[in-house]
Image (cartoon, grey):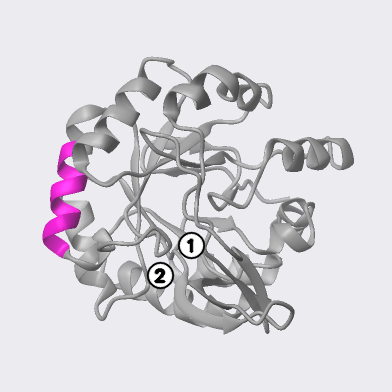
Amino acid sequence: MKNLSCNIGGLDLENPIMNASGCWSLDSMRTLIQARPDFRPGCIVIKGVTLEPRVGNKGQRIIEVKSGMINRIGLQNPGVSVFIRDYLSQWCEFGVPLVANVAGKTPGDICEVVRQLEATGKIAAYELNLSCPNVGGIIVATQGHLIRLFVGEVRKTTNRPLWVKLTPNVTEICEMAEAAVKSGADAVSLVNTVLGEAKDPVTGEWVRGGLSGPAIKPIALRMVGDVCHEGIAKDVIGIGGISNAQDAKEFLEAGAKAIAVGTANFKNPLVMAGIWDGLK
């Protein structure tokens, strides 16, 4: 059996397997523990939290496509104060390091989210989401100067490990990763969803949002490899179409130190435990 422990941007993990933000719930975790009491993910990445509540996008939010799905949830969440009051203690029950995925329209908004979470003393690290394609406006992670602004301000707000989640919807991923690292990021999460569109065969509605699942694995692998081979980020979390241990192994071979599983959890809530079995 291999020792799978690792350190990602200053956070020690018992294994390199985690969920992708937005693809895991309290009930999912309870189902996993009941079926596989011998396994826990290295950490849990909590669904994106914002300063104010967000109701999310109207209309169809998820559509299955060949080799993946498109989502346009729109960062639905109850806001940081309600999250802390009603949900945070439940996540703590699992005894796994908690990584808070945080988002906002301005650096000030995100910094306030981090300040409130810091006051709880229950968050091990932060994943700064600068790359959600489903909330309108400019995707921060497509512009280096905005990455530097947001990361720099959040870096001043916490001494805990800071990961930055980047978008694949750019020409040069290395430039964006370098902007994040030079501004204070301890690790980068590669990649978020790829912009796509599909027609719902039932409603006839066109759904434009983020494509995830096996279809984007080659894109994600290429970007992880580019950033790692250039030595831009010491610690990279690979995300994109990981469905089994072989997929995870390929991301680790490309240079990632850890991997996050997203869409595959919807098909099989025990998939992370299966990846753990295979990697061992």
**Is residue 226 shown to the viewer in this render?**
yes
Examine the structure image and report whether residue 147 is included in the region drawn in magenta.
Answer: yes
Q: Quadrant of residue 255?
A: bottom left
Q: Amino acid type of disc 1?
A: Gly
SS type, badge 2: helix
Q: Residue furthest right?
A: 35
Residue range highlighted in magenta: 144-153
Considering the whole magenta stretch, tell me its main secondary structure.
Answer: helix
Q: Quadrant of the C terminus?
A: bottom right
Q: CA distance from mark 1 to mark 2?
A: 6 Å
Q: Quadrant of residue 192?
A: bottom left
Q: Look at 60% across and 38% down and name the residue there.
A: 14
Q: Earlier in the sequence, mark 1 or mark 2?
A: 2
- Residue 112 in the image: above or below residue 14: above
Q: Amino acid type of disc 2?
A: Val
- Residue 232 in the image: above or below residue 52: below
Pick whichever, 274 or 5, lies toward us: 274
**Residue to which mark 1 is pinned:** 238
Residue 37's x, y, as percent? 83, 35
| Label ID, residue 145 | none
Examine the structure image and report whether residue 193 is included in the region drawn in magenta.
Answer: no
- Mark 1 and mark 2 in contact? Answer it, CB < 8 Å: yes
Residue 123's x, y, as percent? 45, 26
| Label ID, residue 224 | 2
Q: Is residue 179 left or right of residue 187?
A: left
- Residue 189 in the image: above or below residue 48: below
**Is residue 232 shown to the viewer in this render?**
no
Q: Look at 13% across and 49% down and name the residue there.
A: 149
SS type, badge 1: strand
* Mark 2 surroundings within 10 Å by alpha-carbon count, few (fewer than 14), some (14 through 19), many (20 or more): many
Pick whichever, 273 or 12, lies toward us: 273
Q: Is residue 38 left or right of residue 117?
A: right
